[in-house]
Image (cartoon, grey):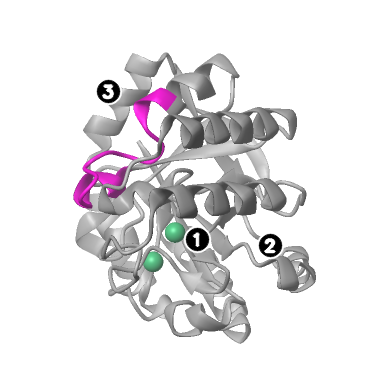
């Protein structure tokens, strides 16, 4: 199995050195681990992501680990970049400057507010889903006007605290998937959702089923914020993918997609 979404202590809300994540993955028999730590230009997220000046050290350390552990595991490196319409130029500059294997894009902020922390008004149930989902889907749609990333991370993230999308919102997500297909991008199956109140991976089985129909490639990530959670619930992910109709996964090397057996 592969794990294409792990964090590190660099983002200030995860624990463990990069090497500890690699060792944990080796112990679990994971074939490829890819760092996808947070980078954000959102003001409100500054303390929850690495600084842009830390990116060179992060990439160098991943490449050192790649060489050191190459007999045991493939180590890859990418970034999970928050979509921030005002900072797209800086994102593109970073993506073009470093030798990354993959670039993930995610939406954690709506109008500058982090909607996915447990301290948010959304998490406390103080904002209506009819307000949050259309905004979130609107941001995803504008994100898809850009081309600097490869993977859409945790597509239906706002359901995290168990405020599920309405039928209208699901239709919105289906429209987003059409656009993802047109742009030939990859969707992430993120198993962290099993451990939030929603108790379901991102995206939902329904959206994953549509991904198969549209032949959208899928990559798997645990979104581990501790070495202990690398590869967590991948047996469930495998079952979901097989049930949805997937027969192989997608990995990335130097921004090129590569097929990975689903085993
Ligand atoms: Zn995080
Ligand atoms: Zn994320």
- Residue 178 picture location, percent across and down: 65, 28
Q: Nearer the viewer, mark 1 or mark 3?
A: 3
Q: CA distance from mark 2 to mark 1?
A: 15 Å
Distance from disc 3 to disc 2, alpha carbons, whole Å, reads 33 Å
Task: Tell which circle, 2 or 1, labels the residue nearer the N-terminal end.
Answer: 1
Q: Position of residue 166 (x, y in %)?
A: 41, 35
Q: Which residue is mark 1?
A: 67
What span is colored magenta in the figure?
A: 191-206
Residue 183 is a magenta residue: no
- In this figure, which residue is indicated by the disc labeled 3? 239
Q: Residue at x 76, y 49 (%)?
A: 147
**171 on left or right of 83:** left
Q: What residue lies at 62% left-to-right and 62% top-to-bottom?
A: 83
- Relative placement, left or right, of 140 versus 260 is right
Mark 1 lies within 8 Å of ligand 1 (Cβ measured): no
Give the secondary structure at mark 1: helix
Q: Residue at x 57, y 46 (%)?
A: 137
The residue mark sitting in front, 2 or 1, is 2
Which residue, given by chain and number where applicable, does mark 2 sit on? 99
**Residue 89 location, quadrant:** bottom right
Q: Of label 3 and label 2, which has the lower sequence position?
A: 2
Q: Quadrant of the C terminus?
A: top left
């Amino acid at each position: 199995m592969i794990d294409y979404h792990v964090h590190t202590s660099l983002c200030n809300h995860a624990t463990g050195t990069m090497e500890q994540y690699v060792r944990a993955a080796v112990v679990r028999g994971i074939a490829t681990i890819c760092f996808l730590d947070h980078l954000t230009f959102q003001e409100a997220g500054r303390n929850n992501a690495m600084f842009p000046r830390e990116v060179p050290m992060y990439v160098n350390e991943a490449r050192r680990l790649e060489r050191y552990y190459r007999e045991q595991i493939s180590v890859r490196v990418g970034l999970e970049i928050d979509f921030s319409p005002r900072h797209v130029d800086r994102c593109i500059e970073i993506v073009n400057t470093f030798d990354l294997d993959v670039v993930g894009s995610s939406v954690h902020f709506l109008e500058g507010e982090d909607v996915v922390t447990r301290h948010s008004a959304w998490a406390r149930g103080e904002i209506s889903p009819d307000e949050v989902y259309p905004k979130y889907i609107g941001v995803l749609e504008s994100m898809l006007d850009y081309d600097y990333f490869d993977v859409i991370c945790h597509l239906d993230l706002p359901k995290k605290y168990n405020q599920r999308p309405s039928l209208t919102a699901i239709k919105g997500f289906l429209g987003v998937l059409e656009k993802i297909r047109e742009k030939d991008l990859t969707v992430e199956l993120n198993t962290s959702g099993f451990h939030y109140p929603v108790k379901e991976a991102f995206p939902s089985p329904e959206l994953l089923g549509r991904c198969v129909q549209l032949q959208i490639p899928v990559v798997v990530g645990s979104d581990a914020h501790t070495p202990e959670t690398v590869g967590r619930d991948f047996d469930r992910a495998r079952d979901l993918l097989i049930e949805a109709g997937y027969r192989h996964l997608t990995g990335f090397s130097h921004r090129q997609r590569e097929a990975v057996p689903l085993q």
